[in-house]
Image (cartoon, rainbow, N blue to C red):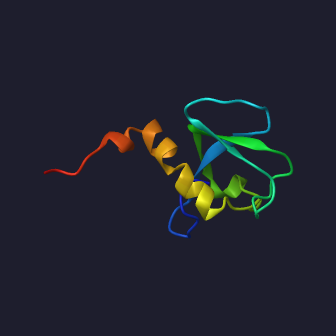
Amino acid sequence: MVSRDNDRRPDLVVCFITSVPRSGPHMAPLGPGDGTGLKVPSVVRFDKLATLDRSVIVGRLGTAPLSWLLAHRGTFEGVFGFATLRPPE
């Protein structure tokens, strides 16, 4: 899930995750364990997002470790051009 899970929003933004081995500039590997809920090595596709209504969400699989989130923050932001933004001088 990309968006925060809170009661103020009726929907959630999620990233596509696949167990099919792939690599690319907008993807990041995420392994099983560490509370991810994944059973096999997987790949998160930051370039494939979906907005889902809460009613179709059955439950939470797991959570990506903070160290993984921080390590791949630039990749995620780069997909949307956020990495190139600079504050005004």
Residue 16 visible in this rendered orientation of the protein: yes
The spot of residue 18 in percent (x, y) is 75, 38
The spot of residue 21 in percent (x, y) is 77, 32
Residue 11 visible in this rendered orientation of the protein: no
Figure quadrant of residue 80: top left
The residue at the point 86 percent across, 51 percent down is: 39
Specify whether 82 is left or right of 26: left
Q: How many marks?
A: 0
Give the camera-side residue of 88 and 57: 88
Give the camera-side residue of 37 and 50: 37
The residue at the point 60 percent across, 63 percent down is: 66
Specify whether 69 is left or right of 89: right
The spot of residue 29 in percent (x, y) is 69, 43
Residue located farthest toward the left when viewing the structure as drawn: 89
Specify whether 48 is left or right of 30: left
The residue at the point 76 percent across, 63 percent down is: 34
The N terminus, quarter of image: bottom right
The residue at the point 55 percent across, 52 percent down is: 71
The spot of residue 83 in percent (x, y) is 37, 43
Image height check: is 58 above or below 51? below
Residue located farthest toward the right when viewing the structure as drawn: 39
Figure quadrant of residue 26: top right
